[in-house]
Amino acid sequence: MGSNGNGNGKLKRIMLVEDSSLMRTVIKKIVESVDEFKVVAEAPNGKVALDLLPKANPDLIILDLEMPVMNGLDFLRNARLRTRAKVMVLSSVAQAGSGNALEARKLGAAAVLGKPSGAVSLDLEQKRGHHIVQIMKSLLRV
């Protein structure tokens, strides 16, 4: 048995879909703070993410909603037929109860979480890091 404690040694594959490279870095640090999680793909918008889906084969997609070219809601509409990955929306425009949050849920997002300080939330790890990890562990049964 490996030292990662999950027994089967299989890493959970995570895709980040976020237009801000700075936020991708912050989110990746949170994700990879857990031994069982590995970021296997990063995309700056929904269109690139759809193109990466077959090769990346993620278990979980962390999805922003506000992005150029193809936003998160359009990605969800298109991705449902292409992947069985769980989707966790992490967006400044998806505060609890908002129209975007409700629409994302309707389109199949398993969890919706608002960024604490706008589109570029450099305090994400301090304010929501633990919560994000708990949601991911719950969704992926880690």
Image (spheres, helix red, strand yellow):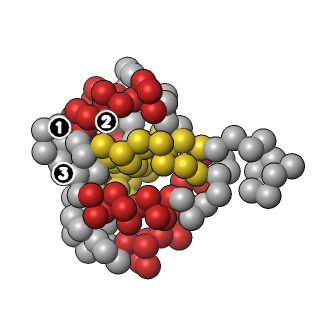
Label of residue 70 in the image: 1
Q: Which residue is drawn at 64% across and 44% down?
A: 11
User: Looking at the picture, which amino acid does disc 2 mark?
Assistant: Ala
Q: What's the residue at 49%, 30% (across, down)?
A: 57
Circle 2 or circle 3, nearest the eye: 2
- Seen as rendered, the residue at the extreme right is 1
Q: Residues within 10 Å of mark 1 (few under 14, many from 20)?
A: some
Residue 47 visible (yes or no): yes
Q: Mark 2 points at which residue?
A: 49
Q: What's the residue at 23%, 33% (across, down)?
A: 47
Residue 26's place in the image compared with 77, above or below, is below
Callout 3 environment at 10 Å: few (<14), some (14 to 19), or many (20+)? some
Estimate the spatial distance between the alpha carbons at disc 2 and disc 3, rounded to whole Å.
Answer: 14 Å
If you read the primary sequence from the N terminus, does the residue marked by circle 2 or circle 3 appear first?
Answer: 2
The residue indicated by pointer 3 is 66
Residue closer to the observer: 123 or 40:
40
